[in-house]
Image (tube, rainbow, N blue to C red):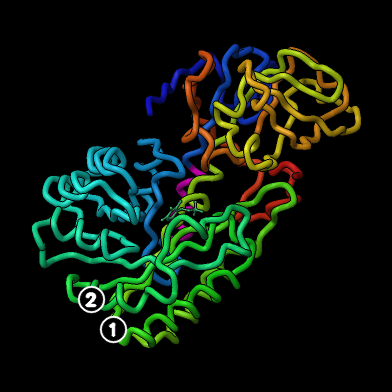
Amino acid sequence: MHQHHRALGLAPQSTADSPVLGGGIDIAKALPVQPVTLVRPHAAARAARFFSEKFPGRSMYAVKANPSPDLLRVLWDNGITHYDVASLAEVRLVADTLPEATLCFMHPVKAEEAIAEAYFTHGVRVFSLDSLDELEKIQRATRFAADLTLCVRLRVSSEHSKLSLASKFGVASHEAKALLFATRQAADSLGICFHVGSQAMTPDAYAQAMERVRAAIVEAAVTVDVIDVGGGFPSVYPDMEPPALERYFEVIGRAFESLPISYSAELWAEPGRALCAEYSSLVVRVERRRGNELYINDGAYGALFDAAHIGWRFPVKLLREPESTVRDHPFSFYGPTCDDLDHMAGPFLLPADVKAGDYIEIGMLGAYGAAMRTRFNGFTSDETVVVTDEPMASLYAQVDPITTSNVVKL
Ligand SMILES: *Cc1c(COP(=O)(O)O)cnc(C)c1O
C-alpha cells in the first residue's frame, strides 16, 4: 500500500488563527476533496508496547488487519517481532519491510507454491493446518523438512464475538485426535491454535476455547509445544465497550498454566484489530444531504466495508468551526459509488444541522478499514496525514477511554 505523507498544507498543531478542527489537521485551510486518512503512530506504538509488555506470552501481529508498511515499522520498533501472515503477498511484504521479523504462515489452506517460497526463500518455519491434506502438502512443499513448527487449528465457537470465524477453518473435535497424532510425527514442534472470532466481547471466549484445547490434548495424548490463542482481542466502538484487555490476559494466562503441556511450552497470540484499530481515522466530506441520509465521499468499497456489510458502527465527529451547538441526530451514510449496497446504516450521531460541504471524521478505522479499500467506480484515496492527537477512543490511553475531554464521547 502506497501512502503519501503529503502535508496538504495542514497544520499539525492548533494556532490562534488556524483552528484545528479535528484529528490534528486544519480542515478549514485544506478543504480536501478526497477522503484523508489520519494516522496516529503513537497510538499503534502504545498498543504494541501494551501487548509486548503485558500479554503473558508472545504477540504476533495479524498482518491482514492493516498491512501498511509504516504501521509494520511502528509495531516492530515497539516490540512486535513476530508476524502472522496468510498469503504469499503478505509474506513478501513483511520480509521486505522487516527483514529480521519472524513470519508465521497461519492460513490453514495454502497454495503449495506459497509454502515452498515461504520456506525456502523467506525462512518461514511456522505453518498452520486443519486437515491431513494440508499436512501432506506442507511436507511435500518443504521436502519433508525436519525443522517445522506445525500448528493444528481447532474449530471453536464464535458465540462471544461480533464477527464469526467458526465455520470456515478448524478441525472438528472428532477428527482432532488423528490430525494431532499425524502432525506430531511430522513436526519438530507441535502447536495448537484457534480463533474465537473477531471483537470477542468477553474473556470467557478464550476460557471456553482453552477447554477445547485441553480435551483435544488429553484425547490425542501428544506432547504440545505451542498454544496459540489467535486473534479476536477487541477494540472499543459505540455500544461495544469490552472489559479491560488485562482481564483477557489473566484468563488466558491462567488457562494456559493449567493445560497438560510441557513446562517449556510457549503461549502465543495473534492480535490484529487490537493492535491497529486506534492507528487511523478518516476525514470525509458530505457531498449531499437528503433528509437523514448523508452522501459522503467514502464508503463500502473504500474504508467503510464493515460499516456497510456487517453494520459496524464507528464513532463520528463533525469537523466544523465554530462547533455546531445543535443537538445530535441519527444519520445514515451513502458512499460515493453508484451502487445501492454502498450504504452504511449506522446510526451515526451528528449535529442535526450537518450539511453538504461539512467534513466528518470517522474514528477507529485502523483495523479492516484502509486494508479493504478498492478502486471500484474510480473512487479511492491514498491521502494520508500523520497526526499526534488522541484517537476518538482508546483501550490504552492512561485515561478513561470514554469520558475524557480529549477522547470524544461515543
Ligand atoms: C484475522 C485473523 C487474526 C486477527 O484477528 P483479530 O480479530 O483482528 O484480532 C488472527 N489470526 C488469524 C488466523 C486470523 O485469520
**Can the viewer see residue 363 in this picture?**
no
Q: Residues within 10 Å of mark 2 (few under 14, many from 20)?
A: many
Position of 274 compared to 410: left or right?
left
In the picture shown, does residue 362 fall above or below 336? below
Q: Amino acid at mark 1?
A: Val
Residue drawn 51% across the image and 19% down it: 376
Which secondary structure lies at badge 1?
loop
Residue depicted at x 48% and y 20%? 375
Q: Which residues are magenta?
A: 42-51
Residue 376 vertical position relative to residue 54 in the rendered view, above or below: above
The dot on residue 184 is 2
Q: Looking at the picture, how far across and down is residue 186, in whole percent?
A: 17, 71
* Quadrant for the C terminus in the image: top right
Q: Mark 2 to mark 1: distance in Å? A: 7 Å
Is 128 situated above or below 16? below
- Between 233 and 197, the residue placed more toward the observer is 197
Residue drawn at 68 percent across, 52 percent down = 401
For the N terminus, give its image quadrant: top left
What is the x, y in percent for residue 191? 31, 71
Viewer-proximal residue among 188 and 15: 188
88 with respect to 17 (left or right): left
In which quadrant of the rendered view does residue 26 lie? top right
Q: Nearer the viewer, residue 339 or 56?
A: 339
User: In the rendering, at what x and y percent does residue 215 appear?
Assistant: 44, 83
Q: How many marks?
A: 2
Label 2 beta carbon less than 8 Å to ligand 1? no
10 Å neighbourhood of mark 1: few (<14), some, or many (≥20)?
some
- Circle 2/circle 1 CB separation < 8 Å: yes
Q: Position of residue 194 (x, y in %)?
A: 43, 65
State yes or no: residue 47 in magenta: yes
Give residue 222's mark.
Answer: 1
